[in-house]
Image (cartoon, rainbow, N blue to C red):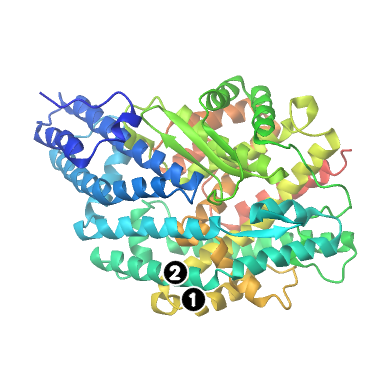
Amino acid sequence: MSPVLPKTAVEFMKWDWAQIEPHFEALNSRSLTAETISGWLADWSRLNEFLFETFARLQVATTQDTSDQEAERQFNTFLETIYPAAQAADQKLKQKLLSSGLKPAGFDMPLRNMRTEAALFREENLPLLTEERKLSNEYDKIIGAQTVRWEGQERTLMQLRPVFQDPDRTVRERAWRLAAERQLADREAINALWVKFMDLRGQLAANADFSDYRAFRWQQMLRFDYTPADCFKFHQAIEMVVAPAAERIYRRRQEQLELKTLCPWDLEVDPLGRPALRPFKTGTELEATTAAMFERLDSQLGDYFNRLRRHKLLDLDNRTGKAPGGYCTHFPVEKQPFIFMNAVGVHDDVQTLLHEAGHAFHVFESAHLPYIQQLEVGMEFGEVGSMAMELLGAPYLSHQQGGFYSEGDAARAQVEHLEGILLFWPYMAVVDAFQHWVYENHADASNPDHCDGQWASLWARFMPGVDWSGLEQEMSTGWHRKLHIHQVPFYYVEYGLAQLGAVQVWHNALQNQARALANYRQALSLGGTVPLPQLFDTAGARFAFDATTLQTAVDRVEERIIELETVG
């Protein structure tokens, strides 16, 4: 008789490996035939759902309070005593399925992924992967502890961001320099952590018989539809097409602010002297107004978002000790997403929630798929779901549409977002090109000083328009403050590729919103059952790296900016 799993993941979280292992052994002992495969897959999937949700809930707890030692202990215990053993046991089940020669319906992509993972698997890498996750937690602790004294109060660096929008340039500069000073105080700590990351990743690659970590990571990330050469092509297209558009935005800002040079503390203030957008005061207000926007956009999406509210699956407000950034994770046993972010009352927070809600909608739309292995979607498309939602939600930012602003401020917010897209692509190219250099030059890049130099070189190539004179160390250590570089290497070009897909979905919506939204949701519902280019195509976009496609997107964004600037 097969062992029985608990009813909830919360109960499963109390289990140790001695309680979990019999479930893997039972699956491995069962015969696999055309008649039994669907039941076997369902049971295997369910076991993995419990493990995935346990991991997700424990990780969420460590990010909600980076100073919570008990949460850290529980997560580390899972990583040390359960996660590696489960990975090894899961590998045996993958090999069992692959050797059976069976091809379940809707399982082509999962089988492709499993073949790659099976070839990549090395027992000796399991403790290294566990150690890598611990190092990631150390990075979170360093960043999460960064606070400053501002006007007599302790503030997180995120809480200082609204000051960067102050019309008084002296105040902005003082706040910016205070934040930069605090960040630089952790320079040695982050550099020391970096050396550990590099040593560990070099060993991961060597153990799996790869010549370098990039080759290993490419397979680990299941990138089948493009190569490093495609990324370099994308970088070149951005340098040729987008960097000039970004420089135009910076030049116009400089002229509007009547400045001799544009400095880093001049990038968030309104260039026309209007008060900074303050869309909400609390996370509760943020979620309620965003819910009203989604209800206007699409009743089903509105229902999805309200489920998150009802089940308390939103952690929105910034606070001391909270890990940086924002994310949406998945609790597969409950078939529910969870959104985490650091809201401080600025418009970027609205954009972040729209973005993470797009990921949540992806979870809901693909929940009908029977096996967890079918949910693995390349983030090149996963980020289309989120970035497109930022754009699809934009017409609902005004009070008349349930949103946060007057018509004029809603248009202004959209202009800022669209300009942000054009400014983002060059920054994305810096981050991605930096990571290619790092792992093509592992020995050199293991020296953090060399990383500073490479970052500065790439910044000069892709990011003209802002004066960093006298701020060279602040600029050259920018890689310290991009968590993806440390925690999830090579996970960044996805944002650039997805942004290109999202702009195409958005442009379709400007012409026929109902059709564009239906295509978008249909693509989300496919999960990971079809290749990446097919997902883009279903959503009404093209998976591309070339300058021509990028130029069309840039033209559409700039045209829309001109239209919106006539409003209000």
* Residue drawn at x 82%, y 54% as measured from the top left: 166
* Count of marks overlaid on the render: 2
First reached walking from the N terminus: tag 2 or tag 1: 2
- Relative placement, left or right, of 488 versus 471 is left
Asked whether the viewer can see residue 488, the reply is: no
Residue type at mark 1 is Pro
The residue to which callout 2 is attached is 194
Q: What is the spatial separation of the Cα atoms under label 2 and label 1, in whole angstroms?
A: 7 Å
The residue to which callout 1 is attached is 448
- Relative placement, left or right, of 440 versus 125 is right
Element at label 1: helix
Say if 60 sits above or below 334 in the image: below
Q: Quadrant location of the C terminus?
A: top right
Q: Position of residue 306 (x, y in %)?
A: 57, 23
Task: Work out whether residue 105 or residue 1 is closer to the camera in this orientation and state it.
Answer: 1
Q: Position of residue 103 (x, y in %)?
A: 22, 34
Say if 46 sits above or below 142 in the image: above
Say if 269 sits above or below 345 in the image: below
Q: Quadrant location of the N terminus?
A: top left
Disc 1 residue crowd, few under 14, some 14–19, many 20+, Cα 10 Å:
many
Q: Residue 407's quadrant in the figure? A: top right
Q: Residue furthest front?
A: 152
Say if 355 sits above or below 33 in the image: below
